[in-house]
Amino acid sequence: MDNIPISEIAKNFEKKGFYMSRDGKAKERGEKYANKKLCFVATDIEFLANLLFRLSNHEECYGVKYSHLEREGMYLGRCFMAKEEIIGKLWRKYKNHPKLMCSVQDDDFTMKFRQKR
C-alpha cells in the first residue's frame, strides 16, 4: 500500500498540542478504550502517520495520535483500541517491523508513577 504524502495525511488529523490526533470508530460509537495502548517510535513521520491513519479505520480503534515534533529524529505514535486482545495482536504484527519500534504501555501500571500536574 502506497503512503499518502504527509501534507495530505495530516488533513485527516486534528492538531492537539504536540500531537496530531484522529478519533476511531469505537469512540464514535461511544465505547471506552482499553487501559493499554500501542506505542510506536519511527524516524519516518510519513510512514508513521499513514500507519496510524490505517489503524484509525479499524472497527475496534478508539483513536490514534502522533507527535508532529521530533525528538532527535524520532516521532512518537499511539494507538488506542477498545479491546486488549486487538492490542496484543497488533503488537505481535508490528513488533519486528523494520521501520518502527512497537511496545505496549499498561496505563494501570504506569499511572501511579506519573507526575501530577
Image: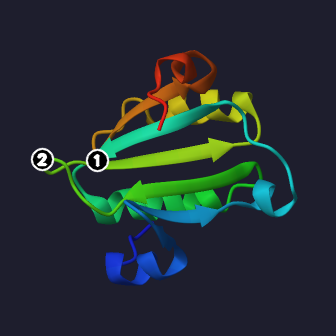
The numbered disc on residue 72 is 2
Asked which secondary structure carries label 1, the reply is: strand
Quadrant location of the N terminus? bottom left
Amino acid beneath label 1: Ala
Q: Position of residue 28 (x, y in %)?
A: 81, 64
In the figure, is residue 100 to the left or right of 92? left
Amino acid beneath label 2: Glu
In the figure, is residue 23 to the left or right of 42? right
- What residue do we see at 58% from left, 65% from top? 22
Q: Are there few (<14), some (14-19), or many (20+) residues within 10 Å of tag 1?
A: many
In the figure, is residue 90 to the left or right of 9? right
Q: Position of residue 9 (x, y in %)?
A: 44, 76
Q: Position of residue 69 (x, y in %)?
A: 26, 60
- What residue do we see at 70% from left, 52% from top? 62
Q: Nearer the viewer, residue 31 or 47?
A: 31
- What residue do we see at 41% from left, 84% from top? 8
- What residue do we see at 36% from left, 38% from top? 97
Sequence-wise first label, 1 or 2:
1
Distance Cα–Cα, label 1 vs label 2 = 11 Å
In this figure, which residue is indicated by the disc labeled 1?
A: 42
